Each structure stands twice: as structure tokens, then as C-alpha cells.
Image: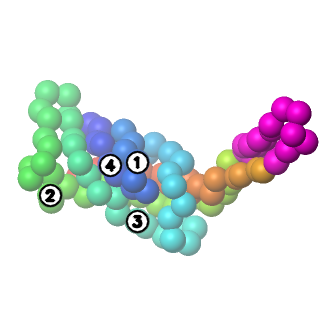
């Protein structure tokens, strides 16, 4: 059985005992969070919309971290204009405990 959940404006395909990285959540390590379920599938039956209003996806926060650095370098030829900027996106690693 798997589910499509939404968190941080993105959608993820998850199943039980799976570990995924999502946009940073405001929760401490070890906390349990509930993710919004959009769709579930158990192999032969697909539920979506109002059918999944009472389905819950519970996940446990494993850790917080930052992705690898992305370097943005802007350059204009013959103008002596250069701008270097870096960015590291924060994320939260969660383990899916149950999809019911």
C-alpha cells in the first residue's frame, strides 16, 4: 500500500517504513507529525478526494539538515560585473510510521 502525501507545497509517494527528506518542518527530532493524504492505493483500489479524508499518515522526525550548496554566479561580459551567491536549502528527514 502506498499514499501520495503533501507537505511543504510538494507531493511525495510514500509507503510504511520509508525514509524521505521533506521541506523543513517546525518539529523537534523524535516528534510525530501527521501529513495530509491526497491519494491511497492498495494494489487494486485507488481512493482519492473525499474518500481519503479520514486516512492518516503518521511520520516521525528523524533529523534536520541542509542540502549541498548551490552556487549562483552572475556575470556580465566586459562590464566588470560579477556576483557570487550560495544557497543551502534546509530539510527534515522523516520516517513514515503508518498509513491508515
Cα–Cα span, label 1 and label 3: 16 Å
Cα–Cα span, label 1 and label 4: 8 Å
69 is higher (above) or lower (below) than 56: above
Q: Which residues are magenta?
A: 68-84
Q: Residue furthest left?
A: 50
On the rendered structure, is 70 left or right of 24? right
First of labels 2, 4 by sequence position:
4
Question: Which residue matches tag 1?
Answer: 10
Residue 22 locus on image (x, y percent): 50, 51
The residue under the point 63% across, 57% down is 90
Q: Residues within 10 Å of mark 3 (few under 14, many from 20)?
A: some
Cα–Cα span, label 2 and label 4: 12 Å
Residue 39 locus on image (x, y percent): 22, 43
Task: Check if mark 2's residue and mark 4's residue have beta carbons within 8 Å.
Answer: no
Front-most of residues 86 and 25: 86
Question: Which residue matches tag 2?
Answer: 53
Residue 29 locus on image (x, y percent): 57, 67
Label 4 sits on a secondary structure element that is: strand
Cα–Cα span, label 2 and label 1: 19 Å
Q: Residues within 10 Å of mark 4 (few under 14, many from 20)?
A: some
Question: Which residue matches tag 3?
Answer: 33
First of labels 1, 4 by sequence position:
4
First of labels 2, 1 by sequence position:
1
* Residue 98 in sight: no
Cα–Cα span, label 2 and label 3: 17 Å
Q: Nearer the viewer, mark 1 or mark 4?
A: 1
Amino acid at each position: 500500500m502506498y499514499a501520495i502525501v503533501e507537505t511543504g507545497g510538494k507531493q511525495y509517494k510514500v509507503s510504511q517504513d520509508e525514509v524521505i527528506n521533506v521541506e523543513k518542518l517546525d518539529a523537534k527530532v523524535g516528534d510525530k507529525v501527521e501529513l495530509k493524504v491526497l491519494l491511497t492505493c492498495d494494489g487494486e483500489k485507488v481512493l482519492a478526494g473525499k474518500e481519503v479524508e479520514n486516512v492518516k499518515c503518521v511520520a516521525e522526525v528523524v533529523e534536520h539538515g541542509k542540502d549541498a550548496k548551490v552556487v549562483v554566479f552572475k556575470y556580465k561580459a566586459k562590464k566588470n560585473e560579477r556576483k557570487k551567491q550560495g544557497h543551502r536549502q534546509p530539510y527534515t528527514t522523516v520516517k513514515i510510521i503508518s498509513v491508515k
